[in-house]
Amino acid sequence: MAETGSGADSAPVFEAALPMAGRMASLTPLIRRRVAPNGGPFTGSGTCTYVVGHGRVAVIDPGPDDAAHVAALLADLGAETVEAIVVTHTHRDHSPGARLLRARTGAPIVGCGPHRAARDLAAGEVAVLDAGADRLHVPDRAMREGDRLSGAGWSLVAIETPGHTMNHLAFALPEENALFSGDHVMAWSTSIVAPPDGAMRAYMASLDKLRGRSEGVYWPGHGGPVRDPRRYVRGLANHRRRRETSILARIAAGDTTIPAIVAAIYQGLDPRLRGAAALSVFAHLEDLVERGLVATEGGARLDGVFGRAGTAG
């Protein structure tokens, strides 16, 4: 699930072209991709479902609750056997299709654990993204950092990358020095980070973690590949730091609410993405309050009033 690439401090986009939904594409000797037909402002052309290997394969992120997408995927595979159904995280555009695919193939669901929030809801708080959470997801095997799944000529290694969701996993494919980055890193847009579903501090730490890795290409949950990932991840981190600086500047200028801050720093934003922008600002403010750089009364809230540290919220 994406946030937006709009705004004066947008992250760089290395490959803006979105892959087409509705057909299987061979990407590398080990990777194929079919894009689910669930395109929109938060999903690009749709969720990327990846097939790893040949003959006996793994399927990564079967997508939404769409029986037609799963049926088309199986038609593409023909006589090939699905050995494992791998899920990066529990948003409804990624994980519900896993249960449909398991029912058709008997293959186990592996990867991320059940959905969990970054923190408990505050009194009177509403989880805005709750409808997007797949709370029915229960894997047959939950993978943790370093866990490996192997098949004929391929292996997938789990990398914990919380932030977009707290159970988010990326998967390295050592045979091709590649990484399936889920919604943590995408080339066409920045990822939405929205409390309490996700957390900005965890997201930034996960970006730093990936910067220390050596994979040469990322295959994301939406959009095309990231071809220079270490440089691109550095750009994403800088983008978030610039956004933080912009928020602090708006608070210093007297903007005390999230709608006022969004209006000031997301000029020209597609109205359909205004809610996502507000949630992103909220994630930054929650982190800034925790670090003592911004003040508010009763903890950071989406409808809160914010001020400079040392002032009343």
Image (spheres, rainbow, N blue to C red):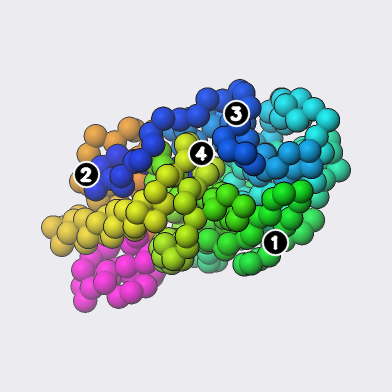
303 or 53: which is nearer to us? 53
- Where is residue 205, by image quadrant? bottom left
Is residue 261 visible to the viewer in this orientation of the structure? yes
**Amino acid, disc 1:** Arg
Q: Is residue 115 visible?
A: no
The Cα–Cα distance between marks 3 and 4, rounded to whole angstroms, is 14 Å
Q: Give, as a single range, the part of the protein colored magenta.
A: 284-313
* Left or right relative to 205: residue 152: right
Q: Secondary structure at mark 2?
A: loop
Q: Which mark's residue is nearer the viewer, 4 or 2? A: 4
Name the residue type under label 3.
Answer: Ala
Amino acid type shown at disc 4: His
The alpha-carbon separation of the residues under discs 4 and 2 comes to 23 Å
Q: Of the two numbered discs 3 and 2 on the same chain, state the one appearing first in sequence.
A: 2
Q: Quadrant of the C terminus?
A: bottom left
* Residue located beneath label 2 in the image: 8
Where residue 99 appears, x then y in whole percent? 76, 42
